[in-house]
Every structure is written in structure tokens, then in C-alpha cells.
Amino acid sequence: MRTETPVAVKLADYSPYPFEIEQVDLAFDLDPDATKVSATLKISRKPGGGTAALVLDGEALDLKSIHLDGRLLGPEDYALTEKALTLPDVPDAFELKTIVEISPAKNTALSGLYISGGRFCTQCESVGFRRITFYPDRPDVMSRFFVTLTADKAACPIMLSNGTPGDVQDAGNGRHTITWDDPHKKPSYLFALCAGDYDVYRDTFTTMSGREIALAVHVDKGDAPRAAWAMDSLKRSMKWDEDTYGREYDLGVFNIVAVRDFNFGAMENKGLNVFNSAYVLADEDSATDADFEAIESIVGHEYFHNWTGNRITCRDWFQLCLKEGLTVFRDQNFSADMRSRPVQRIKDVIRLRGRQFAEDAGPLAHPVRPDTYGSIDNLYTATVYEKGAEVIGMLRRIIGPEAYRKGMDLYFERHDGQAVTIEDFYACFADVTGRDFTQFRRWYSQAGTPQVTVAESWNADAGELTIQLSQSTPPTPGQKDKLPVPIPLELALLDGTGGTDAWTVVLDQPEMTLTRKATGARPLLSVNRDFSAPIRVERDLTRDQRIALVVAETDPFNQWDGVQTLVTEEILKLSEGSQAQPDDQLVDAVASAVRKAAGDPAFAALLTRLPEVGELFLERSPAEPVALHSARKRLQAALSRALSDTITTTLAAPSPTPYEPSAEQAGIRALRAAFITLLGASGAPDAGDTLLALYNAAPNMTERLAAMRALTALGTCQARDTALADFEQRWKHNAIVMDKWFAVQAGQGTAATVAELAAHPDFDLKNPNRVRSVAGVFASANLAAFHAPDGSGYKAVEDIILKADAANPALAARLLTAFEQWRRLEPKARAAAEATLKRLQNAKLSENSADIVSRALG
Ligand code: ARG
Ligand code: ZN
């Protein structure tokens, strides 16, 4: 049996909803097996709305009754399908009341109302609300929500929804009732409810106009102390949005709820943000600095959505980047302001290149704003989020920070309370700058990563450097021919002694020639400083020229990137022979860059980083992941030997105490962890013992995990087994920490490791974090094993995907995206991948998964 791939939705087919929903009254009688939902909608036909039928979305709902203006309707009055309820003949203004029954306990898709850890919670974006009640479940229908929750007092002492709470009333039979009133009109995807028994971590925030907001983070029993960092991050986010964008919070309460079983990172429901508990809970013992950083950034992200997403939302899901790209841009800048801006920029680019560039180079490539999609869940991509954020960054670079802020102010003022488009957004910037953004908007409609080729020639007599720039964007599915996009390029001439003549050009033609005067000897040219545009830069330079450029470079991003280019070229070269050894001069150049950066340990740590196989992959076609992995290891070993003295001295010094999650301390630990990794890669016969000693002595999770990972990378040995057993013993009661234990092994082992981990008693197919920590990590971060030429890696992941898909399509579809690079592979793995995808195509998959498989094969 074969599942049909979903019918494509087209941007061009947009038409406004013919009715206004003035108010929604929702009453929930919460019960895990049978929750009754009554919805009363005040509906009126829009002026000029014609005679359209009323169509409401609804899925997996057990309809009990429908009343129109108090009259009970019979089956002859409506049409009910698997997906919609249609009332062909309705008056111009009326009240519709539906009663449905749903089963939260049976909801394994984690979309709509479900149970996690014995508590009720919801996830409605994008289309989960239709699994709760009949409603026009689209973002351009905005309404006033009034919610009544009734539940068992003992099971649900706390009952939350959006807006402002009323008093709790006794409801008899051991039950109680609360009302929540949200004064802000919102689309259904921002609705949420949570009910259960929680520990609550409370605080307050006083806004810029002096209003005191009650803040609360709701977590599992016993977890309250681990919510302190999330709360701290929330308060700093609220302050930052006031300082940076002039945006104040707009309700008296703000609630966060941590949920164990969650398909995504978190969700920005109005006044009630729901989080994957991995992005709420952290403390000194159990969390790494990366965890603290991720929590800060995601708490910020969801909070910033209150203005970019909630107050102003998207007209339709094609405009998803309008809220996501912009909000990622905002959270990246928040993190940069909280920490080190250059380090943050490097991390953002690593993420972009690792995920988005790969997406853009394969069969799943799509524009930041596509004009068609199959399954909306599959549109929550690195392209929409990360490239979407880069585009906002380029806008800001081109028009400057002041004009950017003016444009944003106008956007908030003009569109508050509306559901809008990318065109509406750019109209604000056109109005404040007088510029035309028509060409700029090609960044939204054209997929693929532009490549910029840079050539230079020096005229010694004139003291002038001529720079030739050209751009091209490779074809992507459905888009063969590309037009030039405006690329803001930050350039500089470097004199080698710190002198920097920097300027910005916008390359908006296929080709452009520039000349720049220089005083003195021939300067070095620095291009795309601070990664000013999300492009690939092609330059024909020798290794010596590249080394000289790294030494002369004054832009921290480009310094780091210059080293990345050098090591990438070296790994690619090494991958051509299985015994080839790294070039000493190159290794020394990298080692000396690391030593020179000692004063900024977070930056030095990034300099030791070698590109992942997933990035190296994009440089080769056909790509041989096994050879790339082995070449990478050889370079890592050489770097480890070159730095061995520095590593020993650094690790001999104590880790900072007392522990603080500050950027300064995190930087020191990042370098220690990077050195622990290198130490493990040295190939020294006593590496296992040294690492085990470091593991045992580690005073924090960052270093402990680095040691355990390095031990795991050694392969089977006593020291590794000892550490893994110890870690499991210590943390078996903490699921978030145990996810790391699973991930470390999946990230280094083979297909057999995955099968073993999947058979572990704590492997839980119903918990997305656990499934991702095994199958997701294996398929995205262990490419030599995933793409094993015998197909064993695919088989291991396929088994998990098939089981996961039956219960949770969004989770399975996300895992399937790991197959996107299959066409690039060496012939054996490629054949095995194709066979796997074809098998999956013939399996009975969910719509979400079928969409990915058919596009991957496409
Ligand atoms: N809006 C959420 C966020 O970015 C993510 C929601 C994901 N939903 C989905 N169907 N993929 O913060
Ligand atoms: Zn978001």
C-alpha cells in the first residue's frame, strides 16, 4: 500500500476567509480519555462576503452536537468529512456552538491536546487547533478568546491558558474551574492550555512603563531549582526587547511550562510559552554551557515572538519566515549582546552552513518563502529560520541600524493586530528609506546558496587593487535559472600590520569590478567580513596566500573562517589517500593561531574546531563520508600533537570556581573541553587512562561530557566502558541528562550501536528527545556510519523511523530529512540509500513523511 503525498498548497491560491470570528468561547472538561470541548463562535459574514458556505477545519474530532443560534442542527444541515465541517447555508451573523469529544491520552502525534508526564498540554502551530475543535484554523483569522477549564482538583491543581486568569471556582465532584481571558486578538495556532500538578518558580518583572508582571516557570515536581536560569533569561529578554526595539510586554502574567514530550524546541503561545523541558531545566551539575546558552536563546526567541509573531502574525503559512526569520535574527542579537558578538556570529554561521547550506544544496531546497508546499509541518526548516534570519541581517546592513529601527517601529505601528505578508514588511522599510526592495525580495523567492567569485589584480604603479566580483546561484528543484541577488559584501584592504581600510559594496549585478587605492605595498583583500552575506566565496589562492591572510586578518569572523578554509582544503586533500599525512606547515599555522588566541578562550576553542563531515560533504561529489571522516581524524591527531604542551598546561590548571554560567567562564570551559577532545584524538597509547582521569575529576558537565565523548571516540576499551557505566548510574533518573548518554554513543558508534541503544530499556519511541538523541544524532552527526556503504546505517534508522511514523509523523518526517544528501554519495552508499527511500515510498507512511520521501527521490 502506498500513501499519497499531500496535495500541494499554493501561495497564489490565497483568498481571505469570508467570515469574521468576533469571539470564541471555549470550555474544556478535561479528562485524559475523553475531554469534552464546547466552542461557541460569534460569527459574521464579512462585508462583500457573498454567500459562501461556512467551512471549519476539524480532524480526529468526535462531534456530539451543533447548535446555530440555539437551534440543534441535524445531519441534513451540514457536511462532515475527515478534515472539515461545512455549513452550506448560514445567516450573515450568528452564533455557532459545537461540542466535540477528544482523547488526549491517545494523542501520540503531540499535535493538539495531549498528555505528557501525566499533565495536559497543547501544541497548535501550525494546524493542531483543528484537532481540538472545529474552527477556521488559519493564521489570518484572529479572534478574542475566552477559555474555561474544568479538571480534577487533585490531578490538576494548576490550570493555565492565554491571557488573564479569573478566580478558581469549585465545580463539584472533586473538580474545579478557572477562566482565562485574552484581550489580544489572536489566531488559533497561538492558543494553549496546560493543566496538571507542577512545581512553580516565580518572579516578577517591572516593565519600562512601570507595570509589574507576574512571571512563572512551571516544571515537574522537584525541578523548580533547575528553572532559575530560564527565569533569569526571561527577565533579560524582556529588558532587551525594551532597550533594543522599544517593545514592552502587554499582559499582567507570563507563564512558561516545561513539557517532557515535545516535537520542537518551544512554542510562543500568547502569555503561555510551552517548552521542551530540555530548554528550561539546567543547573551546574546537570547542564553544559551549551545547554545554558541554548536555554537563553530559546527563552529569548519565544519571548520576542510576542511582538514578531503574536501582535503581528502571518497572513498564511507561506509567510512563516516573516515571524521566524525575524525572530531568529532578534534572538541571535540578544545572545550576541549577552555574550561575545564575534563568537556568537561564528556559532550562527556554523549552524547555517551545517544545516541550511546542506538543505539548499539538495532535493529539499526551497526558497525562504516558498510558493508551494506539501505538508506545512515540513516547512519549519533551516532555510525558513536560519536563512530567513540572514536575510534580515542583510537588510539591516544595507540600510543601516537607524533606518532598520525606524522601519521596525513603523512595522509595529502600522500592522499591530494584523496578519501580514513579507510585502507588507518591506513596504515599511521602503517608506522609511525611500528605497525599492523589489530586487532584494529575490532572497525570499530564490532557493540555493549564491556563490561569489573574487579575483584581484594589483597595479603597483597606480597603487591600486582591482577586484572582480561575480555571482551565480546553482539550480534547485523547480528553479533552473536564477537572477542576481543584492549581496552586501563587507570588504577590507589589510596592510598586514593591523591597518584596515574597510568598506561595503552591494553586489547586485552578475559581475562588478571595483578599484581601491592603497598606500604602500600590495594589501591583502578581506572579503565577506563578519559573514555579511549567506554565500559561498570562491577565491583562487594558494595555501601560503591563505595563511598570510589569516595572519593579517583583523576581522575575528574571517580569522576563524580563514582557518576553516585551510583545514577544509587539507582534509579534502587527505581524504584522497588513506595513509596521507597532514602538512606540518599547515598544522603549525593552525596551532599557532590557537595559541595566539589564548586571551579569548571561547574564540580559541572555535579555532580548534574542524569542519564536520556534513560540511565537507558539500565540497565533494561524489562524497565518501568514510574517507572524509578518516582524513578529519588524521588532521585532528596532528593538531593534537602540535598543541600537546598547551593542552597539558591548560588542563593542569583548575577549572573556574565557583561555577557560574557566565560567558567568561563558559569560554574557559569551552577551550578546556576542546582540548579534552583533541587529547582524545592524539592517538597516544595512554589516552584512555588520561581521559578517564579527566572524566572522574571533571567539576562540571561541560568537561565531563567532553571526556566521555572523547572516550567513546576511542572505540571499545575498558576506560570508555567504565565512564559510560558510571554516567548511566549517576544520571539514570534524569531523562535530559540521559539523552546526552544516548547521543554520545549514537554520535560515534555504528549501526549496531543504534540497534543496541534502541533496545535499551530507557529508549522510548514516544519521547521525541530520546528518539532524536539516538536516530537523529546518528543520522546527522555520524555520517561515516550512517552512510556506511553496506547500507547498515540506513537500515538502523529506517527501523526506528517506521515505528515512530505510526505514532508521530512530525518526528519521523524530521528524521527522514537526513537522507537529503543521498545523490551526492559514492555509488555503493548511494544505491543503498536509494533502495531505502524506495522501500519507504512503498511503505504506508504518514503524509508528512511521504512528502519528504517523495521530494528526496524527486
Ligand atoms: N513557532 C515555534 C518556534 O519557532 C515552532 C513551532 C513548530 N511547529 C511546527 N509545526 N513545526 O518557536
Ligand atoms: Zn519561532
Image: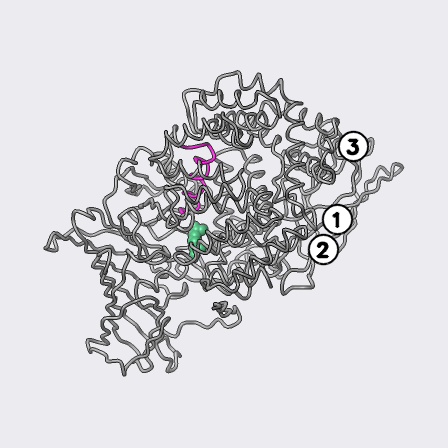
Q: Which of marks 1 and 3 is nearer the N terminus?
A: 1
Secondary structure of residue under mark 2: strand
> Residue 228 vs residue 2: left or right?
left
Residue type pointed to by label 3: Asp
Residue type pointed to by label 2: Ser
At horizontal 69% and vertical 61% (from top left) the residue drawn is 483
At horizontal 39% and vertical 28% (from top left) the residue drawn is 284
| Magenta stretch: includes residue 718 | no
The location of residue 659, given as percent across then percent down, is: 41, 24
Spot the residue most to the left.
172
Q: Earlier in the sequence, mark 1 or mark 2?
A: 1
Residue 420 visible, this orientation: no
Q: Quick one: 315 or 358, which is closer to the camera? A: 358
Q: In this view, does 422 lie above or below 346?
A: below
- Tell me the residue that label 2 is attached to: 472
Q: Are marks 1 and 2 in contact (CB under 8 Å)?
A: yes
Q: Give the range drawn in magenta.
A: 287-303
- Tell me the residue that label 1 is attached to: 453
The location of residue 122, given as percent across then percent down, is: 32, 54
Q: Earlier in the sequence, mark 2 or mark 3?
A: 2
- Tell me the residue that label 3 is attached to: 544
Q: Is residue 185 above or below residue 716?
A: below
Residue 591, quarter of the rendered image: top right
Secondary structure of residue under mark 3: helix
